[in-house]
Image (cartoon, rainbow, N blue to C red):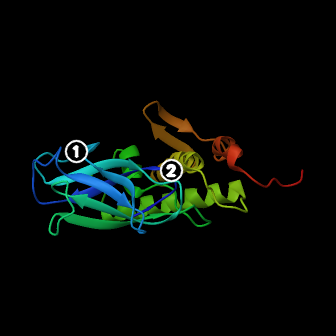
Amino acid sequence: MNVPPVFPYEAVFQSGVTGLVGTVALGLLDNQGAYTDALSTADIIETPAGSGVYVANRTSPDTEGQYTLIWTIDGTTAPGSVTVEELFVTFSTPGTVYGTVDELARILQISSPTVDQTAAMTRCLQAASYEADAFMARSSPLSDGRQIQLATEVVYERAREHWQQQEVSFGIWNDAAGALVIGRDTWARHGLKLLPLRQHFGLA
């Protein structure tokens, strides 16, 4: 799993055993012999109920590097009780795709996307991420979780517009309010949101 520094994320564990909420625990190792986060049962739910799949809400460390998520079904690290997964904490770099297809599908209210829809949403995210990187014109990557959250929110909004423009006639956007005419400069409002993250400005 790849996440930015100081960024909320969800870890998922498929145990095959139901009813372990309050017992199943998750910790984070720094791969140097110490726990970054101690084993904890906090903020872990079983979803769907009775599935044996557990989801934990956590926040990534503030230092980039490679870590190990360690799940335990009984709170111990005895052999047979633990499952591990790598966690990479990295700063964003040019070419980063902000956001996920699953979250974009939720925003678009698509519960079970087809293969073609998934491919189209991927294109929308990639296009919106490229626009965001080009506008920010950064010589250094985003290094703060709040910066990445802002860029990600803007990309979701822009990706939604790309999706809508694939589905309707050019310049017309159908939503709950009816058919709306889209202005020529459809990026402007997104650029305003990203101004705090922009590093280089062209000469007038």
Instruction: Kindly identify which numbered label has been placed on residue 181.
Output: none
Residue at point 60% right, 48% down?
147
- Upstream in the sequence, badge 2 or badge 1? 2
Query: Residue at image x 58%, y 67%?
Result: 95
Q: Residue furthest front?
A: 33
Viewer-proximal residue among 32 and 55:
32
The spot of residue 112 in percent (x, y) is: 27, 54
Q: Nearer the viewer, residue 2 or 65?
A: 65
Task: Name which residue type carries label 1.
Answer: Ile
Mark 2 → mark 1, Cα distance in angstroms = 22 Å
User: Which residue is depicted at the point 70% across and 54% down?
Assistant: 136
Task: State the image coordinates of residue 158 (x, y, percent, origin top left).
Answer: 55, 49
Residue 193 location, quadrant: top right
Q: Name the side, left or right, on which 39 lies relative to 134.
A: left
Query: Residue tagged by mark 2?
Result: 6
Q: Is residue 168 shown to the viewer in this render?
A: no
Quarter of the image where the N terminus is located: bottom left
The image position of residue 54, as x and y in percent, is 21, 52
Q: Is residue 59 visible?
A: yes
Instruction: Kindly indicate the quadrant of the structure image that contains residue 36.
Output: bottom left
Mark seen at residue 45? 1
Mark 1: which secondary structure?
strand
Judging depth in this view, the residue of 110 and 174 nearest the camera is 110
Question: Three-letter amino acid code at disc 2?
Answer: Val
